[in-house]
Amino acid sequence: MPARAPRTDDEREHSRVELVERFFAGTERSYDAMVHWATLGFDGRWKQRMLTHIPDGNGPVLDLACGTGISTLSIARRFPNRLIIGVELRDEYLQIAREKVVRGAIRNVQFELSRAEEFESPLRFDCVTSSYLAKYADLPTLTARCRAMLRHGGLLMMHDFTFPPTKSLIALWRLYFLVMRNSVARIFPEWSEIYRGLPKLIEETRWLVELQRALACSRFRKVTVEHLTLYGSAIVTAVNE
């Protein structure tokens, strides 16, 4: 049997978009609750930790793959005098985010419908941040695009799930997903696809290594990696110098 030809860039791009659609179709109304309970409440702590990395200042902040606005609104509340722009691929998620802005009377937030890798702005941001984007993204394209939108000295920050480094933690990690597939995914069938496919994606992408390579190619400096909660996720920061 002849070897399969490597996928083209267009094929890889289509595969990423298709994966996001398969994972998240129909999940918008349960997303906030699922993110909280499925991470045993750690998602809120992780996002609070991300806030501590955002540099002080008056310049705008860009939140990529903002989903229903959980991170975007937490940044806006922390920095009420700064413009915060949230970018999201799924319009149904942005509808929920905009509802939150209206309910909370938050005036320093804007939302844009776009893929993260395609978003452009004439603004120069103090910080570009994202949560749960890295494992889906075209990281070389994304980091180059972020560098172009960051001011000199601006910070790029990406947070996502990680694959544990030790046998004991891997066993615990796999047990967690087994339990979730056989409990939560049965109660909320719209999440069954992600609980089947997410573990394999996290294990295969190894986005931490890929991101650091992409950051080096885009000439970012001062790259740091902070592991969180038994290596369940990590925050990567880098400076545009």
Image (spheres, rainbow, N blue to C red):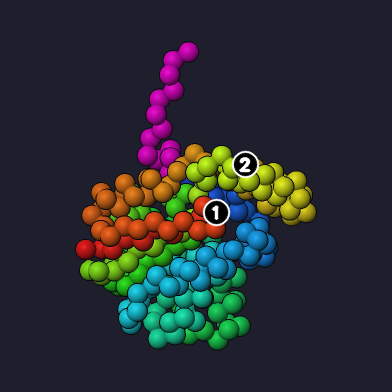
Element under label 2?
helix
Question: Horizontal and vertical percent for residue 93?
Answer: 57, 64
State the residue at coordinates (39%, 29%): 6
Above-or-below relation of 187 to 55: above
- The residue indicated by pointer 1 is 230
Above-or-below relation of 33 to 183: below
Q: Which mark is residue 171?
A: 2
Relative to 96, 206 lies left or right = left
Q: Nearer the viewer, residue 52 or 152?
A: 52
Residue interval drawn in magenta = 1-14
In this view of the protein, can residue 89 be seen by the observer? Answer: no
Quadrant of res 36: bottom right
Q: Nearer the viewer, residue 232 or 218?
A: 232
How many neighbours does mark 1 have within 10 angstroms: few (below 14), some (14-19), or many (20 or more)?
few
Question: Horizontal and vertical percent for residue 206?
Answer: 45, 43
Relative to 190, 224 lies left or right = left
